[in-house]
Image (cartoon, coloured by chain):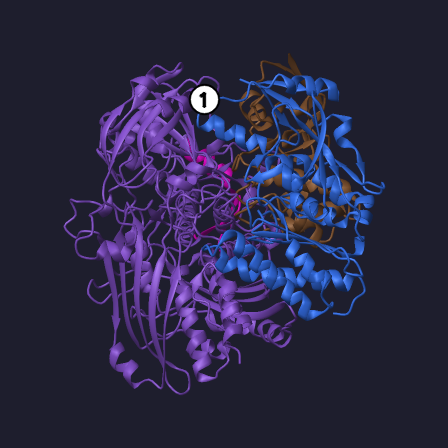
Chain colours: A purple, B blue, C brown
Amino acid sequence: MMLGASAIRVGAQDRATGKTRFGFDQGREGDLFLVCVRAAKGPARIKSMDYAPALAVPGVVRVFTAGDIPGQNRLGIIPVSKDQEFLAQGLVRHYGQAVALVAAESREAALAGARAVRVELEDLPGVFDPAEALAAGAPLVHADRAEGNLLKENRIIKGDAEAALARSAVLVEAEYAIGRVEHAALEMEGGRAYYQDGRVIVKACTQNPHYDQGDLALFLGVEPDRVRVVQAETGGGFGGKLDVSVQPYLALAAWHLKRPVRMAYTREETFLATAKRHPFRMRYVSGADEEGRLTAVKAELLSDTGAFASYGLAVCMRAAVHATGPYLVPNVAVNCRMAYTNNTWNGAMRGFGVPQVALAHEGQMDALAAALGMDPLELRLKNALRADQATATGQVLKSGVGLTQCLERLRPIYEAWRHGLSHGGWHRQGVGLGCMYYGIGNTGVSNPSTAQMEWLPDGRVVLYTGVAELGQGSDTVLRQLAAQRLGLEPEEIDLCRGDTDRTTNAGASSASRQTYISGNAVLNAADNLEELLLTGARELLGARHLDLDLRGRLILEKGGQGRTLEVKEVARFLASEGREIKAGGRFDPNFTALDPATGQGRPYAAYAFAAQCALVEVDTASGLVKVKEVAAAHDVGRAINRRAVMGQICGGVMMGVGMALMEEYQQGSTDNLQNYHIPTAADAPRVTPLIVEEPEETGPYGAKGVGEPALIPTAPAVAGAVSQALGRPMRRLPLNLERVMEAITTAEDQQP
Amino acid sequence: MSSFIIARDLPEALEIMGRGEARIIAGGTDLMIHLRQARLSSRQAPPVILDVSRLPELQRLEPGAPRPFVGAGVTFHRLESDPEVARHLPLLAQAASMVGSLQVRQTGTIGGNVANASPAADGMTALTALGARAEIASLKGYRECSIEELVTAPNKTTLAPGEIILGFTVEEAPPAGQVFAKVGRRQAVSVARLNLAISLDPQLGDPRIALGACFPSPRRLRDVEKLIRQGEPGRQLWQAAGQQAAQHFTDVCGWRSSAVYKAPAVTRVTERALERAWQALGGAA
Amino acid sequence: MELIFKLNGEEVRLSQVPGEESLLTLLRERLGLTGTKEGCGVGECGACSVLLDGKVVNSCLTAAWQAAGREVTTIEGLAGDEDLHPVQRAFVEAGAVQCGFCTPGMILAAKSLLDQNPDPDEEVIKNALAGNLCRCTGYHDIIRAVRRAGKLLRGETS
């Protein structure tokens, strides 16, 4: 099979026949059920808790509270900001935080037990707005923090933005805002755990099994080898399954009770007690010269991490780094602040802050185009980053800069739509553009991946990877890469995935990093496996310096009619010597840390680029917006699996449409899918994915990543299109009925 | 733990209802949500759940009869796909087609829609415009009443313990002039932010307008109907009617925060629906 | 009283099924058929879709007893022992399966649609599947899969 071909997804058949058991489906006859007792207010002090009535409920086995945690009750993905208490310890920091955990023989008994726990809470003053949280005298979310409610402040300073703005021919200044968004992966969090030979084994849905193992060991106060985490098949993540959720509860109960336990969140619990996308308020000033070349961008960003840090540090830094968009901006002044509040915590979600800033940097491009009387596409093209130019952090990109190609691919579609716009009695149409760039992998830190490959004596080849498959297709793509390198068919390679006993750390399935980083680690493992086999072949042949080549299951002498060996002969030889034919691989992208004062540096080794345009129709009677078409051009470096890339693009676009039009989490009023709407098939635009392959020289066969880039340009493009349709800039998402109707009536009132 | 009884005939169902401890299940699309909520909060389930979905009396559907009748157990899917309903009561067919998902339309019933008494129930708004009268049975006998008398507030009806809605008789109206309009937060499967059922006749002698999701229960806008009866068909009249509808809404509900959206939306959606109904009757745009 | 119905072609008899129990709970917890998924519990997402007498319904909004005397088809009952059902095959081949959590319900909804309308156009497919949420695919490849399944069922392609 050729690289780039649309190999059928690993596991698709089992999913289509219902055989796949997801984390949520785990559980066997006789397992105990776990249910959390959640605080009905927050912030609050726990005055008293009486769980004796729960123990009196038939079937209830035990009630756990914070005092039962043998280890550290402060967990979190980023080592320097572990602050999330999985069972409240005296203080409830947000509404819905778990205060106790009930284990019972049935779900009904566990629910009844949870309701029977008497928790007396005393309200504490809280703060729910990030600006208020940073004001003097605000109630502290974590009283022990010297920095108060400020989690982090990131600056990106390049050149002299103030001076450049003062000299600019045009200036545009505007504010943008975006609310909290729920991942709404179709699978709710769930899993199972049991105790065996002094260890706890946890099988749950997750995006990062090796991180889970480490944090569960901290939680239990044991060495990591006492905890085994197996990634259950995971029904979507989008960042929502990067924090641990049910895992600490499962581990705690299995540890104490030495019995198998299971847990499954209700959808309401998923809304209430997992992370959301960070809300952002953004204030931008952008300048350009007479020809439309950007002179400077100044941005003030403010966000809310909620009660816990989770991925807040990463989102703060990434939002700052990407705040000026995929353009050549000579002078930059970005300030991004992330505050604690008593809201449910916010964390990772597809794009880590970049979708939020993209709304603003694209809105600014549209505003500049209007001020200059330029076509928005031409303006973007004029300013698009090109090879050998520097990003906002001063990183000069040598290869893999495909934004101009993306825009050129869009151009004919964009122009046709613009010329074909229709406006009727009750509808108006518009076209909008969105561009983005996205650094692959974690920001300015080491984030390696490892993998192993093994040639078994019976001829089977196994790829061992810690990469969590969530539906994005990493199983399929990593297997394709390994097969390509070894000259095998993907089906000839067995996968062993996501088990801390059998695979090694590949880092999180996040930051669009697995194709690029783990793909490279897999190729490295394949190279090392090849070297093992060739060395074995030379030994078998007694010719130490023979120049050999591995071609699938054959080993050939290079450049001649020389000897040919079958790999199985070599394998048999090595096995007879008791030698394992297993090789490891590793890859860590080349980076430098950002300068703490100026944010300058090389935070990523590779960047993906994309441009999308959207055609929308606004119903001016109701304010309902329909996205009719989206064309999405993505520079992915190299498509390892075209079908999978297009699947990511179409899925990302749809999620972006949801964020643009209808999605906003509001604590207390959006508690399930009937009041938090995500797009249905009837909301799906026609999507034209356009794959641009501008090879990244450090990528596996030139590949970068596409998971998050797929979503990032969509909301700005939709907002731009609605703005064009209504003749008013739309700078707050979502563009729900109320906001659109307000714009329609205001526009009409202002007409002469 | 509830016991579940599948009623075989109406007398049996009425007898069970007469004992006073049964909850009715028809399609289940509302009741099952309540039962789940009860389970999650450890509340008691009703002692008896009475399934009326197999009662032939509730399945009667006679849209072409001199007094058209729609059985309470008729599903939305049947209403949206039955050609006779489309011919005689297109308002009901249109409303039914906009309810929930196909899954919900294939099980949810028009009777359940009314009994559940959500202010946003699409079927109920259509029935209200069609002047529907509910036929209600109990051991004590039969009674009938209008939808507006039956449904008094969100999730509140005047149904007495022991009563079962058998169905609805509706008034005839010119099919061509019937338009149902719904606004939700996405293109499909959403609760109505507002819904509107309109019926016009070529003489504008008997216009009917019902507005839902704006009041505690759907309402006929009789002042708007009067305005239309007395007006000259055309853009100005539809505009005036839209404004009157919004005025009616704010008069009843006050200028609450939701009115910032709903008042202009009611104005516009009403105007457009009237325009469309009039065009469908052959009138000029 | 025993609850008796046909499940995937075979009669099942169950005793002591509470009246308030949903068909979803019965399938997943009592019978261990976890191919039927739960995504919301309130009839909004369609992950729990099953066929009741051939029509797609949300099993979370269906009381188990409503199945009495009827025929229930779950995803486990769709394929033969060896071969995938054409709708399943089309989903696998068209890339309509990403995380796969919505897939069983989506496939049953698609089958129900194609049984009633063998050659639906894009708008009909979108409306028929609007009750089955998917967060991964953007529905693009699912719509392609349904069209492909229609062709397979009509014998226009193999």
Q: Is residue C155 left or right of residue C94?
A: right
Q: Name the residue under label 1.
A: A108
**Residue A314, horizontal then vertical, whole percent:** 30, 54
User: Is residue A639 visible to the viewer in this orientation of the structure?
Assistant: no
Quarter of the image with the C terminus of chain B in it: bottom right
Q: Give the range drawn in magenta.
A: A547-575
Task: Please say whether residue A607 is one of the residues in the magenta stretch.
Answer: no
From the viewer's side, name the closer residue of B45 and A434. Answer: B45
Task: Please say whether residue A571 is one of the residues in the magenta stretch.
Answer: yes
From the viewer's side, name the closer residue of C95 and A591. Answer: C95
User: Is residue B169 visible to the viewer in this orientation of the structure?
Assistant: yes
**Residue B172, horizontal then vertical, whole percent:** 80, 47
Q: Is residue A73 left or right of residue A440?
A: left
Is A578 above or below relative to B83?
above
**Residue B202, horizontal then vertical, whole percent:** 80, 61
10 Å crowding of disc 1: few (<14), some (14-19), many (20+): some
Residue drawn where x is 30% and y is 57% of the image: A316
Determine whether the residue tagged by mark 1 lies in a helix, strand or loop.
Answer: helix
- Amino acid at dot 1: Glu
From the viewer's side, name the closer residue of B38 and A450. Answer: B38
Residue drawn where x is 79% and y is 43% of the image: B82
Q: Label 1 lies in what chain?
A: A
Residue drawn where x is 30% and y is 81% of the image: A165
